[in-house]
Image (tube, grey):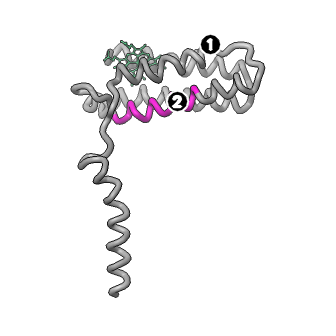
Amino acid sequence: MKNISIFMGLALLGTTAPVLTQGQDGPQPLLTVKEIMNGIITPTTSTIWGAYQLQSETEWLEVQNAALAVIGAGNLLALGGAADGEQNAAQESDWITYNSQMIEAARAVITAVDARDEEALSEAGNNALYPPCESCHQQYQ
Ligand code: HEC
């Protein structure tokens, strides 16, 4: 019994320690939505939308990394931005929907890169990645 309670105490320490370093409510946003758009989304989507006649492995990898960064940005947008009210907006179902669509589109980009399929890449970029930008901006920008 004694061993079990020591074990449980350690397990609790293990789970609570990282949370405490992030504050009571978990990780807090450090960037505003505008900063996420300008700092991450704009440069990476321009790499994806500008991908054309890719030849070297490096060029394909750049597109893949850009898509990974879009997913990372989507992860931040799910938390919400650091400006006033931006965390509340991120709880709304429309925000979650548009953001998920953007993340799914970035996954489709990665699938196209894996297949080295430029037609699938441009389809994912134009038909899947662009629409959620428009929808979210119409409602929230
Ligand atoms: C989940 C919602 C959402 C999605 C998805 C989204 N955006 Fe945004 N975006 C915003 C909001 C909100 C703003 C306004 C931020 C502000 O002005 O404070 C914005 C602003 C911008 C801006 C203007 C930044 C400025 O300096 O005013 C650009 C550029 C932009 N988004 C690009 C994109 C692109 C490209 C995509 C798609 C790949 C995208 N966004 C997807 C919510 C979104």
Return the x and y of residue 139 as percentages of the image width and height.
33, 17
Say whether residue 15 is left or right of residue 71.
left
Name the amino acid type tagged 2: Ala
- Residue 33 part of the magenta segment: no
| Magenta span contains residue 73 | yes
* Amino acid type at image mark 1: Gly
Residue at x-position 40% and y-position 33%: 76
**Quadrant where the image shows the C terminus:** top left
Q: Which residue shows up at 32% across the image and 34% down it?
A: 29
Task: Give above or below for 75 relative to 17.
Answer: above
Query: What residue is disc 1 on?
Result: 50
Residue interval drawn in magenta: 66-79
Point 55% across, 27% down: residue? 105
Give the percent coordinates (x, y) of residue 97.
41, 29
Q: Position of residue 9 (x, y in %)?
A: 32, 73
Q: Residues within 10 Å of mark 1 (few under 14, many from 20)?
A: few
Which percent across, then down, holds residue 137?
37, 15
Q: Quadrant of residue 53?
A: top right
The quarter of the displayed image where residue 56 is located? top right
C-alpha distance separating marks 2 and 1: 16 Å
Q: Residue at x 43, y 28 (%)?
A: 99
Where does label 2 land, which residue?
69
Query: Is the CB–ligand 1 distance for label 2 below 8 Å?
Result: no
Magenta stretch, main secondary structure, is: helix
